[in-house]
Image: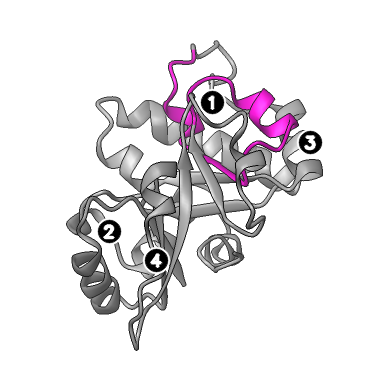
Amino acid sequence: MIDIVIPRDNEKEFISIAEKLGYKELMFLYSLNAFQNKKTFENKKIKAKIGILADSRNIYNLKNKLKDKKTLIAVKSFGNDREIIEKSYADLIFSIESVGHKDFIHQRGSGLNHVMCKLAKEKKVSIGFSFNSILKSNKKYEILGRISQNIKLCRKYKVQSRIASFASKPYEMRAPSDLINFFVVLGMTPKEAQDSLKSST
């Protein structure tokens, strides 16, 4: 099981908590500048990896700058998700539900639709569900409903999903079993939730 986190010079604390929670791997996401100065962390019990957290300023030309094509590029949704998916700017896009979409009478404005799901499947872009986005949301009921809808869409169109804490502070992490149970309540099958927590990087 792997968790994806966004550290702020607190990697050692993350590793310590991850070990206690039962994780075997951690993926640290950094800005491009921070990533270029980071090295992988060595720990006997936790395998730590590093990836890039892209933003609206560099996402469009980031892959051209990378020599190591195996580096995970993640981006938190900022409203231009279809283009990001269609042109494979990122490997993982998360918190799609958190962008200010308007809900409709019979359907939630979840940020995801059948066109985007087909593109994500074709381009091998994973859809990430962030526990931290729920934790910090002022409108939890809206986010939860949108996530439930997006889980169904990902299942229908066989899009790879990833669940993670995306925590910036170690205490925001949750045990793998807690995340699995939480997302099962939101509509994932136990197998889907378990597979979404497994490392594929």
Whether residue 162 is situated above or below residue 197 in the rendered picture: above
Write the start and end of the magenta stretch as one range.
77-101
* Residue wearing tag 3: 118
From mark 2 to mark 4, how far is it between C-alphas? 23 Å
Which of marks 1 and 2 precedes in the sequence? Answer: 1
Magenta stretch: includes residue 82: yes
Instruction: In this rendered view, identify the residue nearer to me: 40 or 197.
Output: 40
Residue 31 visible in this rendered orientation of the protein: no
Residue 169 at x, y percent in the picture: 20, 52
Counting other residues with Cα less than 10 Å from the Cα at mark 1, is it few (<14), some (14-19), or many (20 or more)?
many
In this rendering, the label closer to the viewer, 2 or 1: 2
Q: CA distance from mark 1 to mark 3?
A: 16 Å
The residue indicated by pointer 4 is 39
Residue 97 in the magenta stretch? The answer is yes
Q: Amino acid at mark 4?
A: Lys
Q: Is residue 168 left or right of residue 31?
A: left
Q: Residue at x 49, y 25 (%)?
A: 56
Could you give the CA–CA distance between mark 2 and mark 1, rounded to whole angstroms?
24 Å
Q: Amino acid at mark 2?
A: Met
Residue position for label 1: 110
Does 43 sit above or below residue 175? below
Q: Could you give the CA–CA distance between mark 3 and mark 4, rounded to whole angstroms? A: 35 Å
Which residue position is annotated with label 2? Answer: 173
Q: Is residue 58 left or right of residue 139?
A: right
Of labels 3 and 4, earlier in sequence is 4
Q: Earlier in the sequence, mark 2 or mark 4?
A: 4
Q: Nearer the viewer, residue 44 or 105?
A: 44
Looking at numbered disc 1 in the image, what kind of residue is underneath it? Answer: Ser
